[in-house]
């Protein structure tokens, strides 16, 4: 039986874990993050490493980003760092820039208020009514494992919300009542599923029930915000367990309502199984360090839906061709209401539209230049091979110049015969002998 999170329910002092009792070490932190932490501390401000970086360090992983929390206001932080900039309209924070395009994000501890910075300014609220203490900032965060702080002053880990207990127990739990948290911001449901997939933890029962109950609220969120969230999940290297958890909770069906419309039970199962297989292979590519483009991610996501659609069945029977504009229209239909930049739409449509020509060329054993020379051919062939492996367990094909395995037959170029225009010079010269120049 799961124990209640006592650190969320009472107002006791935080749990402070001294340096000998945790594994967070400065040698695992970026040099630039340490510079920011120490400069803030040396000027008399609190300087904490916050959020996912502390979670990853405690799990023995290398964080991608190091975010810093402080009680210094954005203007005070801006004055401390020459190469810095205050960004954000709704919530102001500071980006500190270093060589090599390295950016350290510094945010001021905030209290739980229902207004952003713009609304607070219009209402005449002061900074003291917006910014708060580390404790107030911890309770604003989404999950307990993301509410841990690392204090550079004494190298301790500070826990206001019971995150250490959930880390040790392998639990994903919201800070506070999950029903209230998800109603206020439904995107937190996506983050709970994401961290469960990335860490392999179990979602706590009340949190899971709240996701199942409030999953339809995700449609009320900003389309662009939700799109950025699931794109981040696709390229995380843990997209297969993310999709499995999201599908089990019903959240995936709410995110992509048009994706599942019109499918029977058997076709829906086929699409789900193929999607899981493709995402598993995508995770393998990303773990090997291969970079994937946004058009490739979009086309891979849509490919299982295409394979169970009537359009693909008509293509397999070679009755119609599949122009790019039809693929673009089907992308819009299946991924509604999400939209992408024109360049992403065009590239993804080309990748999908190339699947039929690649299958046809493979069956014939010849690869025309008009197919191979397309800018998206490499990604289209990669998707074709992933589908072959996930659908039938067949090995990937390798396309070299002239086809697979053996060079293609070369056409012999015929020499063009020169057309005779008038008489040759020698003939004209012979006819003109003995004749006057004027007559010739």
Image: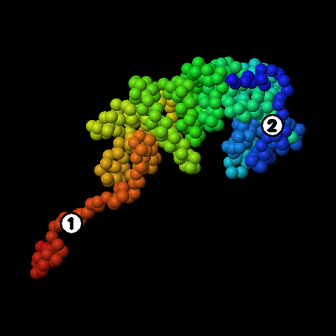
Q: Is residue 410 left or right of residue 424?
A: right
Q: Where is residue 341 in the image (x, y as percent from the top left)?
A: 51, 36
| Residue 61 visible in rendering | yes
Q: Where is residue 337 in the image (x, y as percent from the top left)?
A: 50, 27
Q: Which of marks 2 and 1 is nearer the N terminus?
A: 2
Q: Specify the quadrant that holds the C terminus.
A: bottom left
- Foreground residue among 248 and 409: 248
On residue 418, which mark appears? 1
Distance between mark 2 and mark 1 Cα atoms = 87 Å
Neighbor class of circle 2 (other Cα within 10 Å; few <14, some 14-19, many 20+) is many
**Element class at badge 2:** strand
Residue drawn at 17 percent across, 66 percent down: 420
In the displayed structure, 213 sits above or below 377; it is: above
Q: Position of residue 16 (x, y in %)?
A: 84, 34
The residue that mark 2 highlights is: 157
Res 173 quadrant in image: top right
Q: Is residue 236 left or right of residue 434?
A: right
**Element class at badge 1:** loop
């Amino acid at each position: 039986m799961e124990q209640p999170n006592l650190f969320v329910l009472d107002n006791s002092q935080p749990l402070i874990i001294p340096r000998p009792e945790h594994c967070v070490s400065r040698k695992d932190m970026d040099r630039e993050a340490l510079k920011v932490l120490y400069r803030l501390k040396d000027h008399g401000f609190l300087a904490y490493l916050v959020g996912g970086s502390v979670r990853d360090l405690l799990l023995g992983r290398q964080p991608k980003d190091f975010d810093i929390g402080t009680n210094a206001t954005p203007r005070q932080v801006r004055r401390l760092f020459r190469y810095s900039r205050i960004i954000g309209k709704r919530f102001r924070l500071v980006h500190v820039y270093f060589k090599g395009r390295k950016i350290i994000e510094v945010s001021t501890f905030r209290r739980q208020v229902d207004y952003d910075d713009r609304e607070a300014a219009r209402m005449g609220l002061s900074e003291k009514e917006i910014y708060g203490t580390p404790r107030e900032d911890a309770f604003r965060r989404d999950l307990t494992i993301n509410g841990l702080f690392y204090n550079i002053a004494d190298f301790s880990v500070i826990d206001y919300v019971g995150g250490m207990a959930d880390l040790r127990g392998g639990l994903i739990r919201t800070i506070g009542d999950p029903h209230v948290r998800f109603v206020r911001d439904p995107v937190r449901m996506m983050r709970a599923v994401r961290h469960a997939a990335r860490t392999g933890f179990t979602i706590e029962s009340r949190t899971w029930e709240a996701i199942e109950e409030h999953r339809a609220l995700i449609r009320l969120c900003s389309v662009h915000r939700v799109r950025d969230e699931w794109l981040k999940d696709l390229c995380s290297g843990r997209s297969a367990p993310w999709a499995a958890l999201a599908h089990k909770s019903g959240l995936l069906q709410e995110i992509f309502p048009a994706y599942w419309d019109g499918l029977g039970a058997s076709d829906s199962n086929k699409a789900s199984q193929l999607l899981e297989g493709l995402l598993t292979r995508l995770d393998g590519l990303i773990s090997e360090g291969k970079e994937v483009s946004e058009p490739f991610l979009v086309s891979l996501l849509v490919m299982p839906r295409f394979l169970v659609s009537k359009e693909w069945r008509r293509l397999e029977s070679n009755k119609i061709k599949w122009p790019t504009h039809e693929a673009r229209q089907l992308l819009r239909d299946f991924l509604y209401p999400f939209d992408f930049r024109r360049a992403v739409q065009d590239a993804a449509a080309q990748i999908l539209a190339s699947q039929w020509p690649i299958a046809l060329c493979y069956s014939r054993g010849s690869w025309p230049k008009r197919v191979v020379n397309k800018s998206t051919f490499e990604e289209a062939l990669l998707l074709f091979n992933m589908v072959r492996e996930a659908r039938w367990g067949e090995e990937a094909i390798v396309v070299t110049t002239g086809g697979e395995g053996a060079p293609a037959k070369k056409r012999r170029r015929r020499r063009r015969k020169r057309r005779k225009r008038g008489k040759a010079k020698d003939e004209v010269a012979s006819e003109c002998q003995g004749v006057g120049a004027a007559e010739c």
